[in-house]
Amino acid sequence: MPESLADAVARRRTFAIISHPDAGKTTLTEKLLLFGGAIQLAGEVKAKKNRIQTRSDWMKIERERGISVVTSVMTFEYGGHVFNLLDTPGHEDFADDTYRTLTAVDSAVMVIDAAKGIEPRTLKLFEVCRLRDIPIITFVNKLDRESRDPFEILDEIEEKLALDTAPVTWPIGRGKSFAGTYHLADNTFRHSDEDVKPIPVNGPEADAISGLLPEHERDALVEEMLLAKEACKPFDLQAFREGHLTPVYFGSALRNYGVRDLIEALGKYGPAPRAQEADTRKVEATEEKMTSFVFKIQANMDPNHRDRIAFVRVCSGKLERGMKAKLVRTGKSISLTAPQFFFAKNRITADEAFAGDVVGIPNHGTLRIGDTLTEGEDILFRGVPNFAPEILRRVRLTDAMKAKKLKEALQQMAEEGVVQLFSPEDGSPAIVGVVGALQLDVLKERLKSEYALPVDFEASRFSVCRWISAEDRAELERFIAAHRGDIARDLDDDPVFLAPHEFGLNYEAERWKAITFTAVKDYQ
Ligand code: G4P
């Protein structure tokens, strides 16, 4: 019997991993994929990883297109669940890409280095998850090394993130003596991830547990675990789903501890695809009709064909190969002839995808970030954010004959989300805006390698950019007319006000009270 839509949706778990660089995200990803049978040998993700710190090396990696693609989304199955793991770029200069990706997940795994605790980038990404009420499962990694006391780590999560913690497992030993994970509520343990099924025991005092440790550590561990059982909050599914409490798992991704506990937790507790807010109503994942939105575009994956892949999160229903979908922004219909699924290394044609799934849709520029696809209904999913750039530059072309080509290339890059593009009202050359400096390097490199356009960047006299709006259209028109030289249009033709500094912005904001200046704009 074919699987019902409700059952197919209920099996989906769509998540991202958030962490500070070096906490072990890549290693953990690799192990998860290994469990899911999506890769054969550990090392495949690592070999491809962009783990290079310097700019030039980073560029070299980025040039080998395909890397970030295969890791954009990874689908695998384990224990009857279908997992969609969405990757986020590690470097903070690409934070806007990360925020957009987080709009497409239902839960997140927060990886913490057991020796370092909560680090700055973890904190930032956590805050984004909190804004969206994304439930978080915590994985405390690297227990095989010198690490902090688990209670101290739990305290730190509670204090720094204002998030309740419930340790579900407890590490049996630490550092050199790390010998497994103990499930506090179930009274079971695993020596390592090799144990497919957890082994039942009578309690932390059981010989099977204490026997794993050197004699002088045994009593302390038993005491610690009894205290954890007594003093820590029990896991509460509702509090977790609402984003108030995080279940905590301990392990070592590198040495194969605790990853099986984690993936089982994702399956058991992780939310199935959530209802998604559209402009006029909430869309339930189990609705029959397909709806979806584009949260990421990746272009020129194959340099021989100028193809673009739009990564689409299915929000409801079933997306089928060959179906026609309405692109709500334009009102036009598009054929989904070759949707694709991504595995660790391969992509395959997706015949059908369900709510929660992420598929790639090849297109030649029809789809943009933030686009909504439906089976005809006029709704728009909101919330894929666009951040006001912090760096504004003019692009200088060494060969003036190629101005038209540059314009087209910049337009494409902007549609892809690599940079933002602003066309000044006074007709002066376009301004590109980015959130992080590395994005400019990527732009320059890609213009050169993909479009044969060598460019440089020139300082612009502006450094602040805000979208402007007003309830009274006439007032907005007056503002625009009075600041003609400081107004530009973004890709959607929405007006922005450009200022040389914050002071200039604040000055105008004081004088023009009816104008709203915003630093974040939803796509669409
Ligand atoms: P990231 O993606 O979060 O940046 O982290 P990644 O997985 O690349 O891990 C960062 C470093 O930490 C790597 O070491 C990795 O081997 C190590 N690591 C990850 N998980 C564990 C763990 O559970 N225990 C221990 N002891 N180490 C772990 P590296 O020296 O930077 O790289 P490599 O030379 O070992 O590949």
Image (cartoon, grey):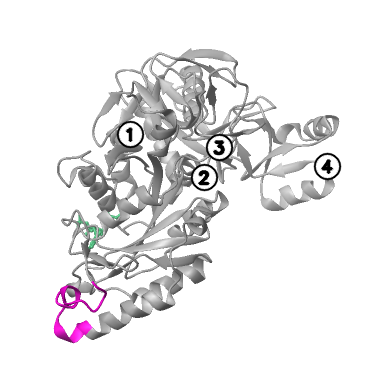
State which tag comes first along the sequence, 3 or 1: 1
Q: Give the crowd class for mark 1: few <14, some 14-19, many >=20 residues within 10 Å.
A: many
Q: Which residue is mark 4?
A: 514
- Which amino acid type is shown beneath numbered disc 1? Val
Label 4 to label 2: alpha-carbon separation: 27 Å
- Against 259, residue 338 (above or below) is above
Identify the residue position indicated by label 2 in the image. 435
How far is the residue under mark 3 from the one under mark 1? 25 Å
* Amino acid type of the residue tagged 4 in the rendering: Ala
Badge 3 residue CB within 8 Å of ligand 1 = no
Number of residues whose C-alpha sits closer than 10 Å to that of mark 3, classed few (under 14), some (14–19) or many (20 or more): some
> Which quarter of the frame holds ligand 1?
bottom left
Query: Which badge, 4 or 1, is on the more N-terminal residue?
Result: 1
- Look at the picture and state if 190 lies above or below 333: below
Which contiguous range is marked in magenta? 202-218
Side (left or right) of 156 relative to 351: right
Q: Residue 69 got which mark? A: 1
**Which tag is nearer the camera, tag 3 or tag 2?**
3
Does label 3 or label 2 sit earlier along the sequence?
A: 3
Q: Are marks 3 and 1 in contact (CB under 8 Å)?
A: no
Cα distance in 3D space between marks 3 and 2: 27 Å
Q: Are marks 4 and 1 in contact (CB under 8 Å)?
A: no
Which residue, given by chain and number where applicable, does mark 3 sit on? 276
- Using the image as rendered, state which of residue 146 and residue 9 is in the foreground: 9
Mark 4 or 2, nearer chain start: 2
